[in-house]
Amino acid sequence: MQDLRTSDIREILKVTQQPEIISFAGGLPASELLPAAEMAELARDLLLDDGVRALQYAPTEGLDMLRELIAGRLQRLWGMRRSTDEVLIVSGSQQALDLTGKLFLDEGDVVLCESPTYLGAIGAFRAYRPTFVEVPTDDDGMVPAALEDRLSSLDRVQLIYVVPDFQNPSGRRWSIERRRKLVELAGRFDVPVIEDAPYAELCFEGEPMPPVAALGDACSVVYLGTASKILSPGMRLGWVVADSDLIRRYVLVKQSTDLHTSSLVQLLAARFMLENDLEAHIARLRDVYRKRRDAMLTALEEHFPQHVSFTRPAGGLFLWVVLPEGVDARWLLERALEERVAFVPGESFFPGGGHENTLRLNFSAMPEERITEGICRLGRVLSTVTADALAAV
Amino acid sequence: MEISIDRDSSEPIFRQIVREIRGFIRSGSLPEGFRLPPERRLADALGVNRSTIFNAYRELKALGLVDAHVGRGTAVLRAPAPIPGAIGVPWRQLFRESVARSHDPIIADLLALTERQDVISFSIGLPAPELLPLDIFAEYTAELIREVGAPLLLHCPTEGHTPLRETLAQWVAARGIRSRASEVLVVSGSQQGLDLVARIFIDPGDVVVVEEPTYIGALQSFRVAGAKIIGIPVDKDGMRTDILASILERERPKLIYTLPTYQNPSGAVMSVERRRHLLELASRWHVPILEDDPYSELRYEGEPLPSLKALDDNDLVLYQSTFSKALFPGLRIGYLVVPPVVLRQLALAKQGADLHANSFSQYLLERFVRDGHFAAHIENSKRAYRRRRDRMVAALRRDPSIGLDFDVPTGGFYIWCRLPEGVEQSALLANAAARGVVFLPGRACYPTEPTENCLRLNFSHASEEDIDVGIERFLEAVREAMVHGHAERPDGATTSPVV
């Protein structure tokens, strides 16, 4: 049951808590940008003028006020028309993934996912012992022919799990054609799509693309959203958007899982959306993260050896590095930690393992000077390592 | 056949047509055998491309809703029974078996009722709103922002905010439980504790022993885990450990779940002898005990009894408690005290489930407990709840002719009330609801068929005046049900947790 690779990550994150380490390993928003003061003030007012509601039980579906705000925002942002009863409030999108596993996955069922895919989803689904099948994926998303092949040849495919916008870990964004193709194939084979969209709002370049859920109908795409990247990861607030009959099923499972999501947290988020300018807050995040990404790209070009390639994500929090064949990112990490810099080796993001020569870098969590300094250190380590490796080839 | 199309919608037009026609077929307005218009005609009528209609019909065929034959056109097949959630994707077929069968309609009925403002609810285990220490919490928020800042909104460890774990280890010491902070796991309410314990111990088909009756939420968690649930009767002295002995030998359960103190729903307190016997049996058969202890602080008379965890020398007891009853539920914070080896597994499961309990609530609670406000709040609550219990007991005894039978609970939240012969509970609930009062039907608290005709009344939430009014309405409903009784079932609304 235990997922060793998840616990590996825990170990890495523990090491990187040390302040002298420059860590590209986390996935956190910039802590100086968190609206902590605003939130505390809202909490004080809330307790004084609506305290009983904030501290009593809430319906398992979530508080209507927040469900409405979220449905309205999805319409405004993406043209998704969803009613309040198509929105379920959950305790972070991690819980959304877990409930999804609990609803759909029995031992031996197949989950189709991107390659690489989000580690938290692997962890959440793995508890239900499915078989993960990685669908070949390029810069534009899953390769349709490969997806169709898996859908027609495999038995017991229960879910297609995708992160179409600025995916963790690769930073990749699906093209509009691939999104359409996904909806079509999923509909044809009657397999639900789980669309995880934590980063969709963090788009730095070009026009934001419609979520897969806006292209399909509520019946075939389950959309997962979260406050973690736009407001606060510590609040543990997320939402599942799907057909209302399906939401009722999620509700039953959530009820036996944790009754409901904290009323205080729900009301706080709702008040923030009503009384503060969430969109302006997100625009600030985008601005800061874009600069940090640029700083990282500039530093990568300057300090990384020629044989190392990396992605240029148009949004999100991460970019993805591919080292020359034969260079193991785990081994590199040990060397990097000696230089006081950390990252996450990419192997963990492939359910089937392999890809030891890949790694993930986070660019959102620290100021530009530190990014430059960290990449410079990493570049130093890499130059020696890749020189050795290439010499050995 | 009126089909409306929204050209501004992001949904492809052929999809919209499929959705509309699908709706007509499901609602029966397009009967079996009905011939859909030829593609060209529908395309002209709707002002769309013929290929759009071609795609729509092809999809309808793929969905098994229509059949197409050259020369005979496209005809509606036998209408499939409308299956909730099965539009587009056959959701129901995809659900796990244990999930598909874990639904109890009586709970949905009840929950719909408690949403109504004019209804006095004795059904849910809520603390009294008047007692909430809102001012203190409001002050803490200001303090926290000065002293803590951003970490309030950031992640905290999966196991819990470290100072809160330390504070809780000290807090349970007052209940005779010796523990270190490293043995305390903070969870997102005790329902999550049940869920996590079920995850790490129970595979489908495994046996779990519970008291009968027991807490509904525990039954839900164990059912979803696919457990075979066996109930052991409860009497005045708690779980019948003599019966447990034979079950352990025969069924070899993976887990024993018990609420030894002010049990939900029966109010029973397990005697010290039974506690020792339970521990001895569990140790003999190597079965872990999940001790759920939400109510022991709320003691209205009698001496406190040691918790099972305090009596346990073999590390067999997983102890669980919560702030939801003695304080308030909206923060969703509970905790477990367990051996480190169990904690590691629970923490891994929790990481997959929701990463960690929300940080802000943990900071708030840590201060509240550490500063002594929690202990003071419990004293306040006990005074108020004792009065409410007495008020409800007196009100229930006002009409002895009805023959309601109950024990006066010495703590906790509930009166467990045996109904006269022949009173049917769902009819009674509907009747009572029509009069503006609801209770929890006892049936929901049994793993299988109820052995007694009981119901549960909560006395902590309603004011003393409402208790008088509500019990009067309740007794009227019972009187009427003793003659005859039937009323309409209410419509479902949202799903409030039953606790």
Image (tube, rainbow, N blue to C red):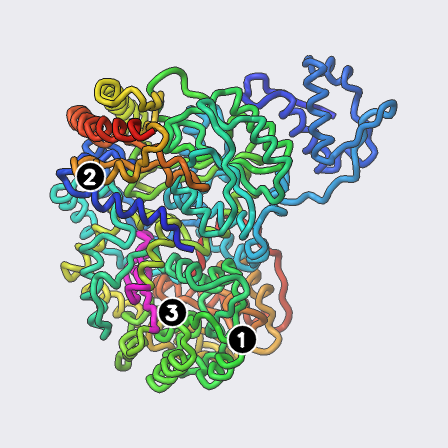
Residue A337 image label:
2
Give the x, y percent position of residue A293: 27, 23
Q: Amino acid at mark 2?
A: Leu
Q: Are marks 2 and 1 in contact (CB under 8 Å)?
A: no
Q: Nearer the viewer, mark 3 or mark 1?
A: 3
Q: Is residue B443 visible?
A: yes
Q: Tag 1, which secondary structure?
A: loop
Q: Which residue is mark 1?
A: B419
Q: Which residue is mark 3?
A: B290
Q: Amino acid at mark 3?
A: Leu
The verdict on a common chain for dots 3 and 1 is yes
Give the x, y percent position of residue B328: 30, 57
Q: Earlier in the sequence, mark 3 or mark 1?
A: 3
Q: Residue furthest front?
A: A392
Q: Residues within 10 Å of mark 2 (few under 14, many from 20)?
A: some
Which quadrant of the rendered structure holds the C terminus of chain B? Answer: bottom left
Q: Tag 3, which secondary structure?
A: strand
Q: Report the span colored magenta.
A: B316-341
